């Protein structure tokens, strides 16, 4: 048996079983959704990069949030679209680890960037006199670098510990790979595969607590000033809604994956698995584009200039 477990290099994704009758329809809808994700996120990214007046901390962090959405969805949609048109749904062990790494690191980077956005709003509203010092270009570069580095490093360590496991199975009951499901295939439990994910969950739970605390403090501060209230409604409400969308989607998928009912239909399971790869990447850029006046005006101005040609 020990000789057999060492040669498992292909894993089976069973999430698409039973979808043969409407795979073409599902492929078209998925391709359309992926196109919309690229369109809305690239619109925000290009608008912020091209317009120098938007080279401010809040918009720089938003630009990185949209880049992260494209990074995370790139780890899922191309493979999922291929599987929809394929008779077999398999993935190499290395490819499975890579997909899990991309999806996990993207999720963690979301919370890192949202924490930066919350800190930016806290300094802008509660400590406006030191805002330009606290959020200088040099510090912004450092903040953004750390916001990307930490999730990449933490998930790299998690992936390394997962890759060291000996597998006694090759069946993953989902439409994509995640480290927790790969760990379930291990022949024996490893303390590293428990400690490392537990640390990661705790670390990013701290991010969520910090974000909630900062916005609660902001709400209390803004109640004493109409100017601050207006600033909060204009720039902070999108962040709060974004946190709710991202946090709710990830939490829903995480809880369901571990404690969900197995008797649910496969279609419902697939939608639950895709939710955090579908809703936040579309809703966030649209919400920011409509709510943040400067971005909305730049986009409308660009559209109008093109339509007049």
Image (cartoon, rainbow, N blue to C red):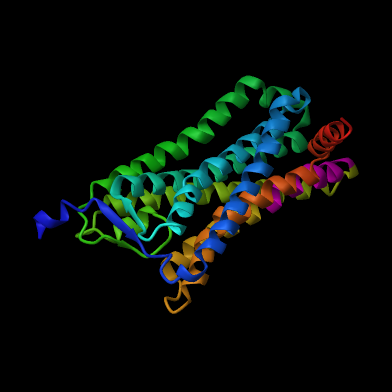
In this view of the protein, can residue 44 be seen by the observer?
A: yes
- The answer to which of 144 and 7 lies nearer the viewer is 7
- The answer to which of 290 and 151 lies nearer the viewer is 290
- The answer to which of 253 and 23 lies nearer the viewer is 23
Question: What range is drawn magenta here?
Answer: 227-241
Residue 236 point in image, percent of width and height: 75, 45
Left or right of 222: which side holds 198? left
Residue 267 point in image, percent of width and height: 50, 70
Q: In which quadrant of the rendered image does the C terminus lie? A: top right
Left or right of 1: which side holds 225? right
Residue located 74% across and 44% down the image? 288
Residue 49 point in image, percent of width and height: 69, 27
Q: In the image, is residue 137 above or below residue 158?
A: above
Q: In the image, is residue 299 above or below residue 192?
A: above
In this view of the protein, can residue 242 be seen by the observer?
A: no
- The answer to which of 55 and 285 lies nearer the viewer is 285
Left or right of 286: which side holds 77? left
Magenta run includes residue 233: yes
Magenta run includes residue 297: no
Residue located 67% across and 34% down the image? 45
Magenta span main SS? helix
Residue located 90% across and 44% down the image? 226
Q: In which quadrant of the rendered image does the N terminus lie? A: bottom left
Residue at the extreme top of the image, as rendered: 138
Residue located 38% across and 51% down the image? 197
């Amino acid at each position: 048996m020990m000789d057999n477990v060492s040669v498992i290099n292909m894993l089976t994704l069973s999430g698409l079983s039973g979808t043969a009758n409407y795979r073409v329809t599902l492929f078209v809808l998925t391709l359309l959704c992926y196109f919309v994700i690229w369109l809305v996120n690239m619109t925000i990214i290009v608008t912020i990069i091209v317009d120098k007046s938007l080279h401010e901390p809040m918009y720089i962090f938003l630009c990185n949030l949209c880049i992260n959405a494209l990074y995370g969805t790139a780890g899922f949609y191309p493979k999922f679209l291929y599987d929809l048109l394929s008779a077999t749904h398999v993935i190499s062990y290395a490819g499975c680890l890579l997909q899990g790494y991309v999806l996990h690191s993207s999720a963690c980077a979301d919370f890192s960037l949202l924490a930066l956005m919350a800190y930016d709003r806290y300094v802008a509203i509660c400590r406006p006199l030191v805002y330009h010092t606290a959020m200088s270009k040099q510090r912004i570069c450092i903040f953004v670098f750390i916001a990307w580095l930490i999730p990449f490093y933490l998930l790299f360590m998690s992936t390394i510990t997962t890759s060291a496991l000996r597998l006694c199975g090759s069946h993953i009951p989902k439409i994509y790979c995640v480290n927790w499901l790969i760990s379930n295939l291990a022949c024996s439990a490893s303390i590293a595969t428990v400690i490392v994910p537990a640390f990661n969950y705790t670390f990013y739970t701290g991010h969520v607590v910090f974000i909630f605390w900062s916005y609660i403090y902001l709400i209390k501060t803004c109640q004493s000033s109409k100017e601050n209230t207006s600033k909060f409604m204009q720039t902070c409400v999108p962040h709060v809604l974004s946190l709710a969308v991202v946090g709710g989607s990830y939490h829903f998928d995480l809880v369901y994956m571990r404690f969900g009912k197995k008797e649910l239909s496969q279609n419902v399971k697939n939608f639950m698995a895709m939710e955090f790869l579908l809703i936040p990447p579309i809703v966030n850029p649209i919400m920011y584009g409509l709510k943040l006046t400067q971005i909305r005006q730049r986009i409308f101005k660009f559209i109008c200039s093109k339509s007049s040609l």
